Amino acid sequence: MRIAVPTEVTPGETRVALVPKSVAQLVQARAEVAVQAGAGARAWIGDEGYQAAGATLAADRATLLAGADCVVVVRRLPDSDVLAMREGAVLAGMLDPGNDPGVLRPLIDRRITAFRLEAMPRISRAQDMDVLSSMSTLAGYHASVTAAARLPRIFPLLMTAAGTLTPARVLVVGAGVAGLQAIATCKRLGAVVEAFDVRPAVREQVESLGARYVETGAEAETQQDAGGYAKALSQDAAERQHQVLSEHARDADVVITTALIPNQRAPILITKEIVQSMKPGSVIVDLAASAGGNCAYTEPDAEVTQNDVLILGPTNSPAAIPGQASQLYSGNLTKFITLLLRDGDLHIDFDDVVMSQTCMTHDGKPVGEQMAALLAGAPA
């Protein structure tokens, strides 16, 4: 199987799908790997590293794509690149059809078998392929250090001859992977941290990191779906949640929001009213910005100031840490591609839940009810 690694073309994307260590592993598994010249430059990975790992370099992007059995990417390819691929080839990456169902049409036209890694099932044997967890870990870390840098005061307690400075107070909303990493990072920086999540099962994890778990009365085991994700609240529960979050956000110096619901717009948890009640100089980092944001004032990839509160809406925080983000993503992707390899050749087993749940198109058709519904609403 010939695997192609093109340069990422999504604006602001600095990661690369495979790093040299992963290339060496795939070559050892009897795959051929071709990398577009300069593909790793924005992650500080030179072409010579890929060559030393056993990859060949390709100067022409169209030729690279046309000659590949499998194309691996971080973000989705533009339609022109998909149409340049060999008919019946494989594409794997974070393809995000939910945000743009139009991505399906060229894949179907070229009979591409496309795998969206963000749909990886949350089962034990797929943990080492879970790109969302890897990238969320980095996003939680980056949100914390960004907040610390932008807050006009220091995070830790400081005792000097001139006086004592009290620690900053941080409220983390959502205790998934990103939220837990934000808690851990803010605690290491010396802040006093509180955290909220509608899933009571995460309380033990929050407290084990040294944070205080905020109870709103909206928590319930039924607020967690089979995949471990939070579900939307009822109106009564949402009102109780709003009241408690208002009280805690008012006292916070930093609020980091991470609350997402699969295939839905992110819930508004930090309302305009809450922002208006916060202290001047406070900072909100909204990691749900790509899904609309948890804060009513959030604008994707923009800085907004309301009532002297700074609101940041990053949509691709891992791209700010390109070397290590590429390393983690490449490790996840390599584990997945290894599943497709049998004696160096491509082998797809749709009885394997990892493949069946991540596959979005195959043999000119959408795979699964969700993809079929998306295609029905996509432009012809």
Image (tube, rainbow, N blue to C red):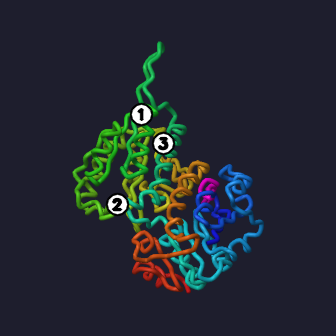
How many numbered tags mark residues here? 3
Q: Which residue occupies 63% across, 76% down?
A: 82
| Precedes in sequence: disc 3 or disc 2 | 3
Magenta: main secondary structure equals: loop
> Which labelled disc corresponds to residue 276?
none
Distance between mark 3 and mark 2 Cα atoms = 22 Å
| 11 versus 2 height, above or below | above
Q: Residue furthest right?
A: 59
Residue sitting nearer the eye, 213 or 246: 213
Element at label 3? helix
Q: Which residues are magenta?
A: 14-23
The amino acid type, in three-letter code, at marker 3 is: Ser
Neighbours of disc 1 within 10 Å: few (<14), some (14-19), many (20+): many
Q: Residue at x 40, y 76 (%)?
A: 351
Residue 237 in picture, x, y percent from top left:
24, 58
Counting other residues with Cα less than 10 Å from the Cα at mark 3, is it few (<14), some (14-19), or many (20 or more)?
many
- The residue pinned by badge 3 equals 144
Looking at the rendered structure, the secondary structure element under dot 2 is: loop
Q: Is residue 179 above or below residue 160?
A: below
Question: Does residue 16 show up magenta in the picture?
Answer: yes
Q: x, y (%) of residue 361? A: 50, 79
How far is mark 2 from mark 1, CA to CA? 27 Å
Q: Is residue 214 magenta?
A: no
Of the residues shown, which amino acid type is indicated by label 2? Tyr
Q: Depth-wise, is mark 2 or mark 1 nearer the camera? A: 2
Q: Residue at x 69, y 63 (%)?
A: 35
